[in-house]
Amino acid sequence: MENIRNFVIIAHIDHGKSTLADRFLELTGTVEKRKMREQVLDSMELERERGITIKMQPVRMIYHPNRPESSRDEGPERSEGPDHVLNLIDTPGHVDFAYEVSRALAAVEGAILLVDSTQGVEAQTISVLDLAKELKLKIIPVINKIDLPGARAEKTAEEIQKILNIEPDGILRVSGKTGEGVDNLLEAVVKKIPAPGGKAESPRKALIFDFDYSLHQGVIAYVRVFDGVFKKGDEIKLAQSGAKFSIQEIGVFKPERFSVPELGAGSIGYIVTNIKDPATVKIGDTLVSVLNPAPALEGYREVQPVVWTSVYPVKEEDFSDFKKAISRLHLSDASFSFEEESSSVLGRGMRLGFLGMLHLEIALERLKREFGVSVIAASPTVAYEIKFKNGETKIVFAPSEFPEEHETVSVKERWVNFKMIVLSKYLSSCLKLIQLHEGSVSGSDSFGEDRIIIQAEMPLRELMRDFFDELKSATSGYASFSYELGAYRDADVVRMDILVHNDRVPAFSRVVSRSRAEREAKDAVEKLYSILPRELFAMKIQASALGRIISSRTLPALKKDVTGYLYGGDRTRKMKLWQKQKKGKKRLKEFGRVDIPHDVFIKMIRRS
């Protein structure tokens, strides 16, 4: 164990984390030069295209500190000695995957804090850094992309000094693209990050920080062994679920899975469980022996979705393929929830719950790319905790199920606490945007030469209402944002219904802020007015909230020239036909029924 180093790279999206990992793999000879490509650890097509890490990927590298001096960068005096095993876990940088990242951090002893020299410290970097500090990890600060013309290494160093309270000479500088300084960084990993603890003779105990799924092998758990030795054939159980299994295979990542005889204390690798139900295995759970179980590791919690959306196949007859695709996607991503629901117009579909907006976008994109399923996704919603007058308390996700105001005692919604780093010149625009989205600023501080960090809070509902796009627009893309879920608070919201020809259409219902109800009502009525086909009778399109109609428009009747075929003759013939048409329209208006076309529903509920 003295020669093992377990670490992660903490970095904001697009700060060069995966590129630096590529250089590590090259320098340690883990991947042959002929097999090297960009973003080796990002195996998913979507990851490579977007330039972000979605799926966690560990890799085991062997570092040779006593290689010839000619093959190294200039740097401090090198350590001579035995080879070291470096276990790197490449983690997602986005806030949606904060819990998974926290479990990866719990599996290591150190972290490289990587900051882009052209961008400086970002909000999401600080959020993950706070997690690392809580777990008392050894932090190695590194400035990346020093080879770029726009690099501002000195300013970036000042920002790192501020958040870590360290001297500037303790900050390393590298270029993940050219490899400059990377060998010095590997040497620092060996020297500064402590060896893992644990005892081989203690009862077996391992943390599951991620998992994959194979149709033939079942759940493949990614583990960090804290105590004991795990071998093929051992009888193991999950501390939280109590499920028992016999280890089918055990191994390490090179970065492909490579079978080994055993995993000892301090090691990172994988265990094939042969469990066919992925819901049984949870990230953060502890693997222990069946006969002599050790206490479970701390930090486990159930992952709860925070954003929900209704998803339907474009064609109703494709529902069976759509359902299979959802089930298969859940095998590789068990962090989203799903349940079947149905709509009187769109047919059968699924209500899906996600960890955040990026998670939602990725899942829908994977359905299309990996399974060839085209879907209709409604605008995302959040959960509300509602206390009824009969004493019942219920969590409501669907707007159509949201009760009338006179039925409730209280309504609560989730809030978020967030940090935002912006250029000083955009401060006023950001403060206005926060106020517009019902947020409040709790504090601000200068951050570097011309940047400000803002701490604030707002309802989760408002975060889903195009806040990210508006923030990018208000700051010309120069803001970074990170949030964490807060507590439930009293919500001042109401259900807004859309009525077409006096009939409520549940699919168009939504939950809106009381202060914006009239604005939202008008927008919804105008949108439906512009896309709903006309009938032979006039139709009222209305929005109802607060116990009254708050917006209304009348769609005029479709005109038909009933006298067009007449040629000449007495005008009384035309007047009789007009009177007959008038009576018919009046009768249709009283008893007629409006059939809203399928494409109108799609346009109204589709995410904008």
Image (cartoon, rainbow, N blue to C red):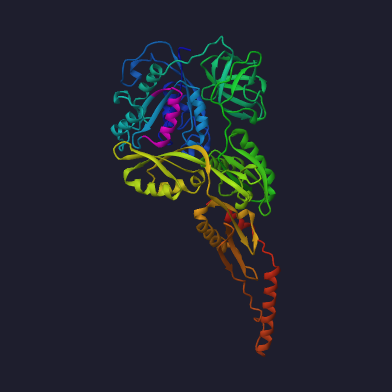
Residue nearer the viewer, 118 or 193: 193
**Picture coordinates of residue 107 (x, y %)?**
50, 22
**Residue at horizontal 52 percent and vertical 49 percent from the top:** 492
Residue 526 magenta: no
Q: Is residue 96 above or below residue 600?
A: above
Task: Examine the rendering and report whether any part of residue 43 can be seen.
Answer: yes
Q: How many marks?
A: 0
**Picture coordinates of residue 163 (x, y %)?**
36, 30
The answer to which quarter of the image holds residue 568 is: bottom right
Report the side of 250 relative to 98 (left or right).
right
**Picture coordinates of residue 364 (x, y %)?**
57, 43
The answer to which quarter of the image holds residue 524 is: bottom right
- In the image as oriented, which residue stretches furthest toward the bottom? 570
The answer to which quarter of the image holds residue 560 is: bottom right
Report the side of 480 relative to 284 (left or right).
left
Residue nearer the viewer, 126 or 562: 126
Residue nearer the viewer, 163 or 560: 163
Q: Which residues are magenta?
A: 121-139
**Residue at horizontal 49 percent and vertical 14 percent from the top:** 197
**Picture coordinates of residue 110 (x, y %)?**
43, 22
**Residue at horizontal 58 percent and vertical 20 percent from the top:** 296
